[in-house]
Each structure stands twice: as structure tokens, then as C-alpha cells.
Amino acid sequence: MNPRFTILPAIDLIEGQAVRLAQGDYAQKTVYSTDPLAVARRFEAEGATWLHVVDLDGAKAGRPKNHEVVRRIVHGTNLRVEVGGGIREPEHWSLYLETGVARVILGSVALQRPERLEAASRAHPGRVVLGLDARNGRVALQGWTETSEETAREVLARFAPLPLAAVIYTDIARDGMLSGPNLTDTLALADASPFPIILSGGISTLDDVRTVAKAAQLHPRLAGLITGKALYEDRFRLMDVLAILEEYKL
């Protein structure tokens, strides 16, 4: 990733709306905007260069459901967009990559059909991200509705030979809760990873951002941070986050 550490504001989509869930629970949904493109443009105006998008409907359905919304964002901004949620078949990742998405995120299918992750990453080196979402240390799948027996580190070790762009690590217990990031587990994964690791879940204050920035100076594989709810609820501004990265020379 360039620069070495990247902030990715997040947009989660349900029925074409920008939402956030609490701990991945679809019953705990807050709608923040009925116009995700406007949200993306606001993030771009505030200095974002990347955008993290998750099709939550797609994650549950096992196929893209909000592709048209993603297409509008890609063509309506200059942001580099990564998208996940329901990307499980070759036609799914081809659909997004041909739309102009910079990277696709494969999560559940990587555990259920690892050959799909291999095929996607080898066909599109540097454009496929592995999404590892953990609950109590175990990797979750199917839109976080099921939990496997494998740890994130065990899964990552299996995919070390692949030409992945990055790995997104989400602690589900922290996601959407504004309770601070799980830096301990994230750094342990980063130190064992051949790929850049992007932290997701729990960022609530600028002090959280500073803590992650300090850690990134010492752990070069920690390469990015996804934040959503704190931005929507005006806990801090994106420009302030970017200023911290500049302060820490990331």
C-alpha cells in the first residue's frame, strides 16, 4: 500500500443505504445515510484516497446485492475502492474488478473454498484482499453468522504463498462498538504475516488512532486502519486522523 499506512473510511451497505451494525448483528442496525455516494464524496473531500465498502446484503446472500451502488461510487469519485461481501464466485470478483473497483475482499469463501481465493489472487495479483473476521479468537464467516474452529493465524499461514494485496483483520466484538481496537491480536497477526495487515473494529477516539500509529512505527506489517462509526457520529474528523499520520510520518 502506498503510503505505507492508509486510512480507509468505511461504508457498509444494506438495501442501498449506508449503515453500521453493532458486533456484526443485523438486528442492531443504524442507518446513517440513504445516499452512499454523497458519503463517499464527503470522505474524498476530507482527504481520503481509499474507501472500504461492505455489501452486508451480499454477505448474507452469498452474492453481490449492492453492485449498482458500488458502481456509482467508483464512477462518481476518484477514490480507490475496495469491496467485500458475498464475493464467492469468479463472476462476482470479475463483476467488481471490471466495474473499476481497485480490490476485492474475499472472506467466507477463503475458508469454505480455499481454491477460490487462490484462483482469484493468482488471476489478479495485488488486487485481492483476505478478510479475516474473528469472534473470541475464531474466524467467523457467512456474514458473521457462523464461527469456524480455526484461528486467524492458522488461516493466514495456509495462504502465505498467495499474491494477496493485504489482509483485513476485524475483531467482531469491537466492530461498531466504539470500544477501542484489539491491537494485541492485530499486532500478533501482523508480526506473523507475510502480507500488510489492516486493522478494523473499535476505533472511537483520536487517542485510539495515535495508539495504532505508534504501533505501526514498530510493526511495519501494520499497514492500515478502517474506521466508520466514529466518523459518522462525529467523534473525530478524517482530516484530524490524516494529521496524526503525518505527525508519525506514516
Image: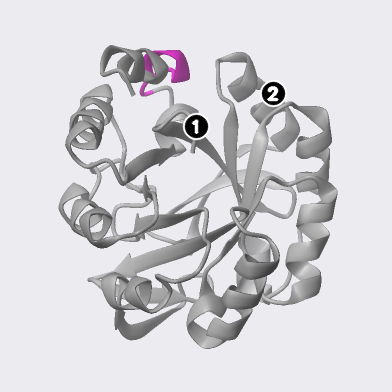
Left or right, 24 with respect to 182, comes to right
* Magenta stretch, residue numbers: 235-240
Question: What x and y, as percent, mark residue 97?
Answer: 77, 54
Magenta stretch holds residue 237: yes
Image position of 216 with respect to 243: above or below: below
Q: Earlier in the sequence, mark 1 or mark 2?
A: 1
Front one among 105 and 72 = 105
Front one among 173 and 96 = 96
Q: Secondary structure at mark 1?
A: loop
In this rendering, which labeled residue sits more in front, label 1 or label 2?
1
Magenta stretch holds residue 141: no
Q: Amino acid at mark 2?
A: Arg
Question: What x and y, as percent, mark residue 197?
Answer: 36, 51
Residue drawn 37% across the image and 57% down it: 169
Left or right, 193 with respect to 126, comes to left
Residue drawn 73% across the image and 26% down it: 78
> In whole angstroms, how far apart are the C-alphas of marks 1 and 2?
21 Å
Residue 87 makes an appearance in the image = no
Report the quarter where the C terminus lies.
top left
Q: What residue does disc 1 label?
A: 2
Question: What x and y, as percent, mark residue 238?
Answer: 46, 20
Image position of 188 with respect to 142: above or below: above
Q: What residue does disc 2 label?
A: 41
Q: Amino acid at mark 1?
A: Asn
